[in-house]
Each structure stands twice: as structure tokens, then as C-alpha cells.
Image (spheres, rainbow, N blue to C red):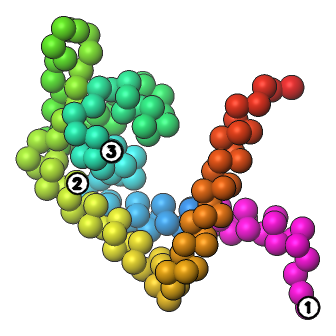
Amino acid sequence: MAVRPRAQRSEILEEMAKVSRKIRTVFDARVREKGLTLARARTLLRIARCEAANQKELADELEIETATLVRLIDGLEAQGLIARREVEGDRRAKQVVLTRAGEALAELVDDMVAEIGREVLSGIDEREVAAALTIIRKMAGNLEAIALEPAE
């Protein structure tokens, strides 16, 4: 029995949500083995990819509140993985940078991300990946447009 197009449109969103939750669960389990939480691992990776970033920019990148980020940074700092530096010309602003231990762990976590990606995409050829990526990008664009619409 064929699946109706309307049902497929609903099902794709449900399946994407399931895949997203399962990826987060797998990633969380793997980073916990390295003494991190999912949130701390994401923060560590973002700092590694942004080089030195101020806390406001970092919170925006991670799509979290600044107060939440401060707690994450406090935890990473207590683990010796990041350091806060004063920003020249603004005593209140802080730049967040990785320590050597943070760099090493960020590299390890980045390798975990790549491995999970290989596992998740196993058996899917490049054309299918390209088609899925095109669709997901269109969906993201649609969501951005919706977010810009005024609330009723």
C-alpha cells in the first residue's frame, strides 16, 4: 500500500525529529565517557571552531541564553579546558579560549562527531546525501522565513 503524499510530509518531520534525538543520545553517551556533558561538548567544539570568541557571540552561536553559557563556561573552566581573557579596551567583556587540554579534548570530540557521521550515513550513497542536504537546507530556509513573520 502506497503512502499518501500528505502522510509522507508529516512522517518526514517525525523521522527527522527521531534521528536528531538519537544522534544527540549517541553523542551524549560518547562524550560522557570523556567527562563532558552534551552541552559542554557542544560549547567546547564551538569555541574550538570560532577561535577566541566573546561570551555573547558564543551564546548566539549555540542558540542559548548568556546565563546558561556562563554556567557551561564555569564548568569547562573548572575542568581546565578553557580560559577567560579580558578583551582589550573593554574590561567587562571576556574572550573564551581553549587551554592545551581543551584543544586536545576538542580534537577528540571532533573525531567522535566525524565517526558518528560516518556511522549514521553508512550505506547511503553520495547522491542520496546531496539530495537530502538540499531538502534540509530548503526546510531550514522555510523555518527562517517563518521565524521572521510577525506573530498573530
Q: Which residue is mark 3?
A: 46
Residue depicted at x 35% and y 65%: 113
> In which quarter of the view is residue 79 placed?
top left
The magenta-colored residue range is 1-18
> Does residue 59 appear left or right of residue 14 in this picture?
left
Q: Specify which label sits upstream in the sequence, 1 or 3.
A: 1
Q: CA distance from mark 1 to mark 3?
A: 45 Å
Q: For the C terminus, give its image quadrant.
A: top right
Q: Secondary structure at mark 2?
A: helix
> Does residue 144 appear left or right of residue 95 in this picture?
right
Q: Specify which label sits upstream in the sequence, 2 or 3.
A: 3
Amino acid type of the residue that numbered disc 1 sits on in the rendered structure: Met
Q: Secondary structure at mark 3?
A: helix
Residue depicted at x 47% and y 77%: 120
The location of residue 27, given as percent across then percent down, is: 40, 64
Q: Which residue is mark 2?
A: 106
Q: Secondary structure at mark 1?
A: loop
> In which quarter of the view is residue 133 placed?
bottom right
> Does residue 24 appear left or right of residue 141 in this picture?
left
Reply yes or no: does residue 2 show up in magenta: yes
Mark 2 Cα-neighbour bin, 10 Å: few <14, some 14–19, many ≥20 = many
Q: For the N terminus, give its image quadrant.
A: bottom right
Say above or below: 76 vs 86.
below
The location of residue 9, given as percent across then percent down, is: 81, 66
Amino acid type of the residue that numbered disc 3 sits on in the rendered structure: Arg
Return the mark for residue 1. Answer: 1
Q: CA distance from mark 1 to mark 2?
A: 48 Å
Return the mark for residue 100. Answer: none
Residue depicted at x 63% and y 50%: 140
Secondary structure predominantly adopted by residues drawn in magenta: helix
